[in-house]
Amino acid sequence: MGMERVIIAGISGSGKTTMATALAARLGLPRTELDALYHGPKWVKRPEFEDDVARFTAEPRWVCEEQYFSTLGGLLWGRADTLVWLDLPRRTVMWRVVRRSVLRVVTRRQLWNGNRETLREFLCDPEHPMRWAWTHHAVRREAIGERLAAHPGLVAVRLRNPREVRRWLRDL
């Protein structure tokens, strides 16, 4: 049995979306982006979020980012057969998340349901991915480790640097 129901875990900026996209293409898995399901207009949580996630994770094959544990609880963990943990160094994550956020602000790139990152959010919002990645890097690592220990049947792949990520994807 191969990877059929895969969650990609890591802190903001670790490459979860990039990995989910690559795995979906490589393994022919349907991919669902949780941010697109979660965020309604003006960054408000969509009321259908939990139902949408429950529906797609009931399917036999999928890949998505592991996020929103405070809302979903163990739903993703309980239905997944594989965890890919992008446990990258803080310096790598911070470089990526800062670069991504700056590009989104400068280009005014539209994200989910019409939302855009703004300079104000970038500088002031304590929940902004850049601040989140800095303040929660160690906390997120510990939480993922605890969740993994609570799901011993889950096949886990822990990748600790970009070279390991590239090698693992290449060797799939």
Image (spheres, grey):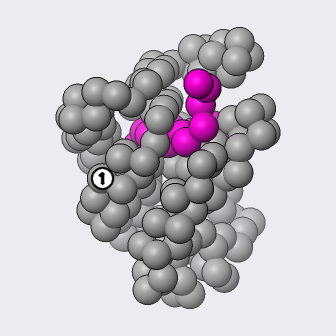
> Dot 1: what SS?
loop
Q: Which residue is mark 1?
A: 74
Q: Position of residue 63 (x, y in %)?
A: 60, 46
Which kind of residue does numbered mark 1 sit on? Gly
* Above or below: residue 34 compared with residue 25: below
Viewer-closest of 160 and 67: 67
User: Does any portion of residue 91 appear in the rendered image?
Assistant: no
Q: Is residue 165 left or right of residue 87?
A: right
Q: Residue 80 location, x and y as percent?
A: 46, 42
**Picture coordinates of residue 26 (x, y %)?**
77, 32
Give the quarter of the figure containing the C terminus: top right
Find the magenta span and give its range: 1-19
At label 1, counting other C-alpha atoms closer than 10 Å, the crowd grade (few under 14, some 14-19, many 20 or more) is: some
Tell me if I can see residue 9 in this picture: yes
In depth, the one of 68 and 136 nearer the eye is 68
Residue 140 part of the magenta-drawn span = no
